[in-house]
Image (cartoon, rainbow, N blue to C red):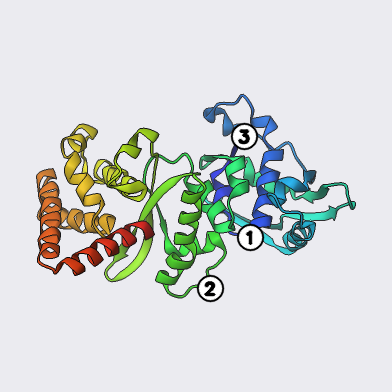
């Protein structure tokens, strides 16, 4: 089932466990009826029909194959104390509230009921800044709250999207936990990416955006991988994702047409297997802009990077060449 929620709800600042995130997802499902049959242009005219609303959820949808009801009840208890906050930049208004209260569960009923704050639905139906679509089943099967959050943010996205590191930390509720950006990427973003990829929910890669020597933003490249592309066996799934992200970057930021990308297909495929391919392309793009150079410069620089790398590897002893190849593969798998 496809769910629709406001962009504002998608970026709301709240720290959640995976069970809490599943409860939130079922609340969103509860409010879908009034959106059925509406076009995206009609969403902005939707008015919240709910006050404080009682929502009943079957436990099995939250447990995902396990039978530990206590985890769901503990999640409900935590949600009663969890503050939910957001800022509406259009109305210049700040809101904060608890998400649920009045939790009720009868043993062996297989269900749990709770009251949902009116404010939650107000945010869910506030489409002034757009909306997000995502698949309910995928959201319920993902194993971590970070994976669910990132999945909701990126699903259906067909263009690069950039978030500041600080804003991402706030959205994930970890703004006070990871002082080093490298730790945040390693322990939050990368595990979430792997979980999403492993469950086949979405495919994406990302690159770090620097200001000087500091990583200040993360740019995400969500891409679709078709079954027919499995023929590119030498690239692997991660290589294909990186290749499509490179195309996306060239089209969105460098003015390339898809026909021009097709004309340089082999270069892009080879460059996609390079370590830190997206970061290297950003460096090339930055140099091109400083020189006021065009597309030919970018393709030429990509070819030179591939050639220099291959030449440096070819001069190594055979055993080291194999280690470099393995390392290159490992780096691309971790991207």
Q: Secondary structure at mark 2?
A: loop
Check whether the beta carbons of the residues at disc 3 and disc 2 lie within 8 A of each other.
no
Q: Quadrant of residue 173?
A: bottom right
Residue 84, compared with residue 51, is above or below; it is below
Residue 279 at x, y percent in the picture: 27, 59
Residue 163 at x, y percent in the picture: 42, 56
- Please report the residue visible at 11 percent of the width from the left and 62 percent of the height from the top: 314
How far separated are the C-alphas under marks 3 and 2? 35 Å
**Residue 149: mark in rendering:** none
Residue labelled with disc 2: 177
Question: Crowding at label 2, few (<14), some or many (≥20) Cα neighbours within 10 Å?
Answer: few
Residue 159, compared with residue 214, is above or below; it is above
Q: Earlier in the sequence, mark 3 or mark 2?
A: 3
**Is 271 on the left-hand or right-hand side of 106?**
left
Residue labelled with disc 3: 1
Question: Crowding at label 1, few (<14), some or many (≥20) Cα neighbours within 10 Å?
Answer: many
Q: Secondary structure at mark 1?
A: loop
Residue 125 at x, y percent in the picture: 63, 40
**Residue 16: mark in rendering:** 1
Question: In this view of the protein, which residue sits in the foreground, 17 or 327?
Answer: 327
Most extreme residue toward the top is 37
Count the marks: how many? 3
Q: Quadrant of residue 76?
A: bottom right
Question: In this view of the protein, which residue sits in the foreground, 205 or 116?
Answer: 205
């Amino acid at each position: 089932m496809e769910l629709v929620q406001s962009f504002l709800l998608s970026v709301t600042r709240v720290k959640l466990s995976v069970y809490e995130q599943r409860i939130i997802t079922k609340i969103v499902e509860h409010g879908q009826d009034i959106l059925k049959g509406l076009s995206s242009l009609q969403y902005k005219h939707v008015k919240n029909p709910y006050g404080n609303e009682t929502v009943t959820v079957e436990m099995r949808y939250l447990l995902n194959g396990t039978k530990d009801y206590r985890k769901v009840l503990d999640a409900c208890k935590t949600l009663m104390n969890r503050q939910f906050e957001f800022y509406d930049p259009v109305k210049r208004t700040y809101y904060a509230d608890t998400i649920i209260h009045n939790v009720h569960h009868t043993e062996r009923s297989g269900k749990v009921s709770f009251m949902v704050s009116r404010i939650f639905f107000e945010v869910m139906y506030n489409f002034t800044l757009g909306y997000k679509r995502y698949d309910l089943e995928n959201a319920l099967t993902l194993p971590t709250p970070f994976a669910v959050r990132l999945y909701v943010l990126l699903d259906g996205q067909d263009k690069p999207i950039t978030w500041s590191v600080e804003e991402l930390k706030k959205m994930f509720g970890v703004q006070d936990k990871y002082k080093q950006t490298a730790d945040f990427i390693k322990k939050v973003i990368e595990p979430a990416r792997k979980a999403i990829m492993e469950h086949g929910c979405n495919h994406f890669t990302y690159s770090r955006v620097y200001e000087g020597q500091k990583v200040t933003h993360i740019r995400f490249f969500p891409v679709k991988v078709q079954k027919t592309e499995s023929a590119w066996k030498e690239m692997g799934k991660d290589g294909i994702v990186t290749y499509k992200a490179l195309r996306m970057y060239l089209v969105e930021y460098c003015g390339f047409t898809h026909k021009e990308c097709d004309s340089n297909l082999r270069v892009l495929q080879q460059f996609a297997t390079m370590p830190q391919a997206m970061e290297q392309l950003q460096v090339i793009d930055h140099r091109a802009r400083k020189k006021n150079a065009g597309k030919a410069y970018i393709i030429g620089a990509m070819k030179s990077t591939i050639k220099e790398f291959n030449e440096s590897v070819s001069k190594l002893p055979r055993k080291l060449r194999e280690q470099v190849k393995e390392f290159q593969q490992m780096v691309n798998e971790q991207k």
